[in-house]
């Protein structure tokens, strides 16, 4: 596995994001008036939520682009949202994504438009942090990342022979990748740890293989996520105390779009989705054989099972317009 350094990631990512926006503008046809341009995040644990939001906005009478055809990582989505190429998504994580709200300042770029988190879809629903296999945690008495400041402890998680711990991390275009790099740069244990970045599902495949083989492994994880059903804290893995904060999952939209669509703003302010339902849906996806049609069917079933609440949200939204 190649270790990917990201010393200039924020600037490069911003430039790539703006290039993507420009190419989409040049090569795609202009959306008709009234069409809501919605994207979704490139992690599957948020697919169903995106479908729920898209369907509810359609019930307000709008056409909505298919989120599954506009899948982006935060590094590219937020610049596109700021410039108005997209109107919203349902997959904001805060405070994890706070850095993207200040993105143009951090990157030294100038773009027009503001973006705004709206409502709280799942309050405190996004836990993230570092985990290790339970066997190694029990053997070494591990409970906190700070213990990796001992180089001999960190070396337990060395997979490439350089003496430092290999931390199976995040996709490069996710906020967690940059947060992890910040922890490595600023923490006492950081000199003994390197982040391995890549496709998260591929990385987790390697993590599972090491756990199953009884080999030490250090990795980043989050909930809600299907991995929780196969890498279960307390059973075969253990959370380590670290500097990650609990996240709220929130919709995020272009501020000008919200000002022009008070009914959609009202809807986004009201929608709440139960964390338990998300976890159960993610577990079904993890079983395999899931298609976009299955995800859409899950979303429609959730809407019908919550029709009384949904109708109230829609009534309030229509009144706001």
Image (spheres, rainbow, N blue to C red):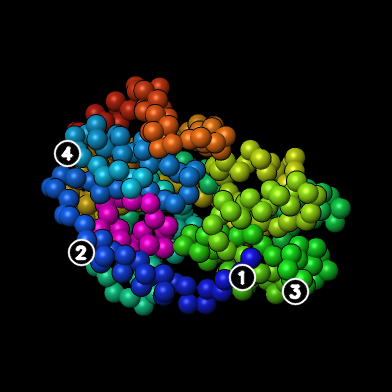
Camera-nearest label, 1 or 4: 1
Disc 2 to disc 3, C-alpha distance: 46 Å
Say if residue 42 shows up in the picture: yes
Q: Are marks 1 and 4 in contact (CB under 8 Å)?
A: no
Q: Which residue is mark 3?
A: 162
Q: Which residue is mark 4?
A: 321
Closer-to-camera residue (293/59): 293
Kind of element beneath mark 1: loop
Identity of the residue drawn at 54% across and 36% down: 288
Say whether disc 1 or disc 4 marks the residue closer to the N-terminus: 1
Q: Which residue is mark 1?
A: 3
Neighbour tally class for label 4: few under 14, some 14-19, many 20 plus, Cα within 10 Å: few
Say whether disc 1 or disc 3 marks the residue closer to the N-terminus: 1
Residue 26: numbered disc? 2
Say if residue 272 shows up in the picture: no
Disc 1 to disc 4, C-alpha distance: 51 Å
Q: Quadrant of the C terminus?
A: top left
Q: Quadrant of the N terminus?
A: bottom right
Identity of the residue drawn at 56% across and 54% down: 200
Q: Position of residue 139 (x, y in %)?
A: 86, 53
User: What's drawn in magenta, residue-wise?
Assistant: 70-89
Say whether disc 2 or disc 1 marks the residue closer to the N-terminus: 1
């Amino acid at each position: 596995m190649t270790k990917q350094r990201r010393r200039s990631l924020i600037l490069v990512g911003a430039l790539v994001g703006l290039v993507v926006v420009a190419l989409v503008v040049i090569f795609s046809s202009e959306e008709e008036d009234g069409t809501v341009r919605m994207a979704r995040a490139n992690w599957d644990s948020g697919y169903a939520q995106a479908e729920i939001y898209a369907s509810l906005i359609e019930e307000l009478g709008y056409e909505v682009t298919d989120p599954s055809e506009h899948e982006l990582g935060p590094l590219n989505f937020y610049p596109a949202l700021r410039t108005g190429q997209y109107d919203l998504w349902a997959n904001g994580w805060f405070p994890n994504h706070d850095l993207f709200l200040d993105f143009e300042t951090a990157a030294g770029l100038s773009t027009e438009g503001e973006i705004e988190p709206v409502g709280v879809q799942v309050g405190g629903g996004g836990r993230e942090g570092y985990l290790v296999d339970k066997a190694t945690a029990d053997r070494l008495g591990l409970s906190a990342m700070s213990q990796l400041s001992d180089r001999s402890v960190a070396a337990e998680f060395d997979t490439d022979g350089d003496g430092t711990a290999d931390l199976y991390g995040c996709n490069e275009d996710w906020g967690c990748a940059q947060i992890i790099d910040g922890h490595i740069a600023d923490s006492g244990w950081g000199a003994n740890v390197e982040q391995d970045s890549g496709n998260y599902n591929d990385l987790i495949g390697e993590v599972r293989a090491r756990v199953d083989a009884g080999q030490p492994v250090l990795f980043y994880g989050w909930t809600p996520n299907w991995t929780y059903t196969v890498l279960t804290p307390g059973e075969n893995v253990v959370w380590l105390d670290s500097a990650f904060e609990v996240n709220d999952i929130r919709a995020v939209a272009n501020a000008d779009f919200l000002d022009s669509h008070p009914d959609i703003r009202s809807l986004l302010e009201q929608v709440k989705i139960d964390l338990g339902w998300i976890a159960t849906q993610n577990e079904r996806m993890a079983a395999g054989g899931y298609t976009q049609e299955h995800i859409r069917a899950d979303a429609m079933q959730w809407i019908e099972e919550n029709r009384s609440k949904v109708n109230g949200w829609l009534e309030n939204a229509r009144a706001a317009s």
